Amino acid sequence: MLLHDSATLLWRANSSAVALDLTREYFRQLERGYDSSDARRSVTTERFMMSVFRPDIVCRDFEGLRAYMDQWEKYTTFHEGLTFTLKSLRVLGTAGDERSAVTVYATGELDVTFTQDTLKFLYPTLVHEREIRDTLVGSRGSLPIEMALHFDHQGCVFAFESRVNLVSTLLEILHSPSAAIHALQASIMTADGHWQVTQDEEEAARRERLLPRQLL
């Protein structure tokens, strides 16, 4: 309890600096992705995520910390050699929402090697397209990513936004604009870089209402 009170006092005294530090630690915790079968690493990551992210965290595509970790696990296990690197970060303010104490904008890179599982689960219609399949499988790609983490007045992330520039990565690997667009259209990833889950229009609209003013 004393540690929790100390953390709360620190947050209230210097929320911007603490939010920046927590965002840096977020990138560090996930620098190799997340795989629940790796007990030693995953327990540490889960402990951090549960201490910083609200269990009902929301984004445009889904809601809940468990769903978020599931997204990370798919990225990690459907590719090989995932690395997650922080490039820049800065404080943006409160996003005009009374729930928000501070918002941190971060850019980074997600480096992955494409595998058969990548195609099977993320680009299922490309599995039988030999030329694209043979080019993608085994290739290393860097996915530029933008994030906005919205911290509440208790110092927890209650909402986030993300953008992944998938088309630039596909173009770099395939060396053909038409092939890159074709692969992008075959992907079941959303514009925010998430594995596409079944969407319900009412649920999507409800999530939109829960989000602060969108920045990305």
Image: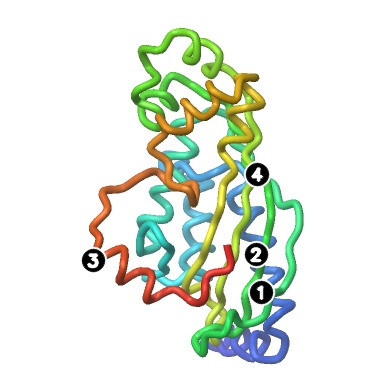
Report if the CB atoms under discs 1 and 2 are less than 8 Å apart.
Answer: yes
Q: Tell me the kind of residue under disc 1.
A: Ala
Determine which residue is flagged by label 4. 144
Mark 3 and mark 1 lie on one chain; the one further toward the N terminus is 1
Disc 3: which residue = 202
Q: Which of 96 and 18 is in front in this view?
A: 96
Q: Where does label 2 land, which residue?
A: 23
Distance from the alpha carbon under mark 4 to that under mark 2: 17 Å
Tags 3 and 1 in contact by the CB under 8 Å rule?
Answer: no
Q: Does 173 sit left or right of 206 as displayed?
A: right
Q: Nearer the viewer, residue 80 or 105?
A: 105
How packed mark 4 is, by other alpha carbons closer than 10 Å (few <14, some 14-19, many 20 or more), is some
Q: Which of marks 2 and 3 is nearer the N terminus?
A: 2
- Of labels 4 and 3, the one closer to you: 3
Residue beneath the point at 54% across and 63% down = 48
| Mark 3 to mark 1 CA distance (whole Å) | 32 Å
Please tell me whether residue 109 is drawn above or below residue 3 in the rendered image: above
Give the CA distance from mark 1 to mark 4.
Answer: 22 Å
